[in-house]
Image (spheres, rainbow, N blue to C red):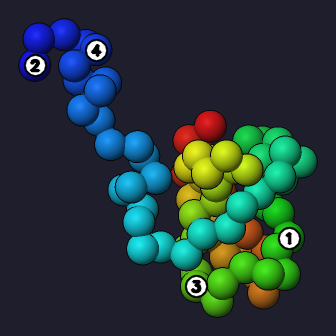
Amino acid sequence: LRSAEDVTFRMFPPVKAVAGKPTITIDETELRTLRFGQAIVRRDAPPDDEIVALDTTGKLVSLLKRIGPELWTPSRNFD
């Protein structure tokens, strides 16, 4: 590699690191809530205990952990 540009070009998108994990797409309101470390309610989430949250463009924004039947809190935010 010759430059930072080369490194950036060869990097995989972060969403590839969580390929195979269940995902949900979140809207701007939910994204704002997660940014503050607060939980969101999702009745349509998969039954898993950890899921991946993507924004409406498919960008990885958060890893979520279940803290209740329909309640999810961020374990790691990327946005």
Mark 4 residue crowding within 10 angstroms, few (<14) / some (14–19) / many (20+) = few
Instruction: Tell me: residue 34, above or below residue 72.
Output: above
Q: Position of residue 21 (x, y in %)?
A: 47, 73
Q: Amino acid at mark 3?
A: Asp
- Name the residue beneath numbered marker 2: 1
CA distance for labels 3 and 1: 15 Å
Mark 3 residue crowding within 10 angstroms, few (<14) / some (14–19) / many (20+) = few
In this orientation, does residue 27 appear? yes
Q: Position of residue 40 (x, y in %)?
A: 82, 63
- Name the residue beneath numbered marker 4: 5
Nearest to viewer (mark 1 / mark 4): 4
Q: Amino acid at mark 2?
A: Leu
Indicate which disc, 3 or 1, sits on the residue closer to the N terminus.
1
State the SS at label 4: helix
Q: Position of residue 31 (x, y in %)?
A: 78, 47
- Name the residue beneath numbered marker 1: 41
Residue at the image point whose x is 55% and y is 75% from the top: 22
Indicate which disc, 2 or 1, sits on the residue closer to the N terminus.
2
Q: Position of residue 33 (x, y in %)?
A: 83, 48
Give yes or no for contact between labels 4 and 3 (Cβ–Cβ under 8 Å): no
| Residue lying farthest to the right in this orientation | 29
Indicate which disc, 1 or 4, sits on the residue closer to the N terminus.
4
Residue at the image point whose x is 59% and y is 46% from the top: 59
Left or right, 63 with respect to 12, comes to right
CA distance for labels 2 and 3: 40 Å
- Name the residue beneath numbered marker 3: 48
CA distance for labels 4 and 3: 38 Å
Q: Amino acid at mark 1?
A: Val
